[in-house]
Structures are given as C-alpha cells and as structure tokens.
Image (tube, helix red, strand yellow):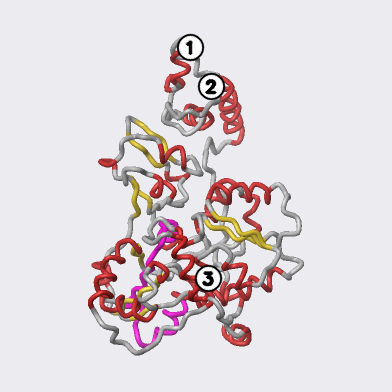
Amino acid sequence: MADYYHSVILMEEKCTGCTVCMQNCPTQAIRVIDGKAHITPEKCIDCGVCIRVCPYGAKSAVTDTLKDLEAYDFKVAMPSMSFYSQFPGNFSKTKVDNALKTLGFDAIIDQSYYAEVIAYHLGNLSEDPFQEKPMISTYCPAITRLIQLKNPELIKNIIPIETPMEVAARLYKENSAAAHPEGSIGIFYISQCPAKITSIKKPLGLKKSSLDGALSTQSLYPLLMQILSHREDYDQHVTPVYLGESWSILGGQSLTSEIEASIKVDGIDEVAKILDMAELGKLSGIQFIETYACIGGCVGGPLNVENPFIARYRVESRTRGLSPIDTGEIEDNFDFNALLWDLEIEPLDILGLDKDLTVAMEKMTRIDRLVAELPGIDCGACGCPSCRSLAEDIVQKKASLSDCVFQKLQGGRRNESL
C-alpha cells in the first residue's frame, strides 16, 4: 500500500483552474498549476469539501463497483448510518434492504447497533477521572486526520476505539467463520463520504480494515429507486431500527452516550476552530467533543443525494421514542478492551522540510522571511491558497517568488535567497 491513499481525485479534463477548491480546502492541500488543480497527497484528509464546492464537477471519489462483488462468494452490504435517510418515507428500512439484495447482496449489516455499544463505553469513559478530557470521537475519520495534521497535541484526547463499521464488520466475519471460509465473505460499505472510503483502504489505528471495499450512495441510489418503484416487498422480515442511527446527525453521539458536558460541532472550518481552542486549553469543563466534517453530520456527506435537512428530519422521525440497547446486553457481550485499536496513531509532518532538525529550522526561518516579503493578502493568483503556502512551496523548490503577481508588479523577480 502506498504511503498515502486518497479516494478524492481530480478529473483534469473538467478542471478550469478556477481556484474555488483551492480557496476552500481546510488543509491547503490544493494548488493550481498551469491552469489545473493539483492535490498535495500528504495534506489531503479526504474531507470532500472540494467535491462539494467545485462548480464544474471536477472532483470525485474513487469507489468500488457492483462488479467488484463478484470476487466473493458471500456478499454483504453495510449501509452508512445516513443511508436510509436518503429515501422517501414510504420506503421503509426493510424495503431498502430488500432492494439491496436484489442488486446482488446476500446480507445486510446494521452498524447502528454497534454505535450504541460504543456510545455506552464513551459514556463510561466520560466519568473516568484518569481519562484525558475533552474526549474526541474517531467516528469522523476526516477529523482524526485533521488532528494528525494540525493539532497533534490532541492525539492523546482521541478515544482509540474502533468505529461502529469496523466493529460490525469484524464481528460479522468472526461469527460467520464456520459457514464461510476466510476470504469468501466480502463486506462493502455504502459510503456517504470519501473519508470513510479512505479509512477502509488506509485505516487509522488498525493494521487492516475488516471491510473489503466501498461503494457510494450516489452510485447505488438510482438503481435502488428503480427497484423500489417497480417491485413489491418480498421479504417479510422486518429490519429493526436502533437509536444508534442518530449518529448520522449532529448530536447523535452525545445523545446515545448520555454525555451532557459536550460540544457538538459540524463543518470542517468550525471544527478546526474548536480544536484550536481545545489545544490551547480553552474548553475547561467539557468532557466530549462531537465533531463532523460535514455540515449537519453524515447526512451532509458529499456522496449522499438527499437534502441534509430533509435527511435529518427522517432520522429524527425514525429514532424518536426509541429506547437504547439494554446495558446488560452490552456488558455481557462487548468487552471494552476488545474494541480498542491495535495501533497508535502519530502526528503527520505536512511540511517535511528536512529530516535534519537544524536544516528544517533554517528552512522555517527562510519561510518566515519570505512571508514578510509577500503582500499578505492571500489572493491565490500565484496558484497557492495563501502567501505562507507560497513561501513554503518556494523553500521546498515547488514554486518561485516570481509566481507572485505583486512581486512582478514591483519590479520583477526578487531575491529568493532570503
């Protein structure tokens, strides 16, 4: 596996070099070079903001296809927790599951049950005086990667526990081992966002994901709607609905874990502000930070199809009045230690100036000097999202000071040996 796997891709033939994606990328991972956007892989967190904001549809996500199911004898779908909210209310969860089976899946896994299992343990941790506070959930992988890149001091606050989809997939394979030999089961996630896809191909905190691939909600939705509109329900088994489905909307994690001293924040830019405050110790008394890169939560994922506010209403309607899973059932069947990651995560060096600390410090000094020479208006005309990012690129020999139009207007090429 490559050092960096990303599901977000650029379709160069559609790119006009408009810089909208560059100006909106939360980690400044995009440059515009020779009229085309380029993604810097080590800075990309697969949040999908560029997919959402590109006016020309030049950004997309790499996913598996239904043809990839053919590699497995037993094919299992695991819908995202926002998946069922994409369908009109007259199509029940049971009907949607039946439609998935018509597409070729043999079974469906409901990860929302396992969300409640994890929520129970999160609630217990919030009362542990030795647990680092505020705790940060790993449910949104884009946020975990953001912390690795920009707030590494908060890695100790991340709860090193598997996500619901990983717990569900791992236990399904373990419980099915007798009936299905290893390698014969293929579990495919139906994803609302590119970050979840990346977390399968390059998992965080795990040596290997228990899932085998991912398809997007966008790709399956028209096929499923065609089936739902023309075929009567044939499976009488009623799919249960769990309170854990509320994890797909902002506030769901705090609700199910019963953590009152929590901050619920959505939208990658607002999350970044809260993380900065947490790193500076400005969130005293807060036990838990519930974060989503997408506005509204997972219902706002860029690979979904429904209006996120309508989707939220459907989630709230379906989960309203539901009781949580019995705590005795969780305590008897789910040991906390068995849910933990098997690897530690580490900070990511996005600049990578030099392995030699002395040389790296010298380069940092050069960057600061260059920033002082630049106009500081972050116009983006140079193809970089900010003057500082241009200075960084110059020091790393990826750009030139003459790329700055203001430097040209002030008399041509300036001395880059600053």
Q: Residue 343's x, y, as percent? A: 55, 63
Residue range of the region highlighted in magenta in the rendering: 170-198
Q: Mark 2 points at which residue?
A: 374
Q: Is residue 237 left or right of residue 388?
A: left
Q: Mark 3 points at which residue?
A: 246
Q: Left or right of 351: which side holds 16?
A: left
**Disc assigned to residue 24:** none
Mark closest to the chain's N terminus, 3 or 2 = 3
For the N terminus, the quadrant is bottom left
Mark 3 or 2, closer to the camera: 3
- The answer to whether mark 3 and mark 1 are in CB contact below 8 A is no
The answer to whether residue 128 is above or below residue 415 is below
Which residue reaches farthest bottom? Answer: 236
Q: Determine the image quadrant of residue 126.
A: bottom right
Q: Which residue is drawn at 60% across and 80% down?
A: 335
Give the foreground label among 3 and 1: 3
Q: Is residue 391 left or right of residue 183?
A: right
Q: Earlier in the sequence, mark 2 or mark 1?
A: 2
Q: Distance between the residues labelled 3 and 1?
A: 56 Å
**Looking at the image, which is closer to me, 249 or 67?**
249
Spatial CA span between label 2 and label 1: 11 Å
The percent position of residue 114, horizontal first and vertical second, equals 52, 76
Q: Name the residue under label 1.
A: 410
Q: Residue 393, relative to residue 54: is it above or below?
A: above
Q: Work out which quarter of the rendered image holds the C terminus and state it.
A: top right
Q: Where is residue 61 in the image (x, y as percent from the top left)?
A: 35, 54
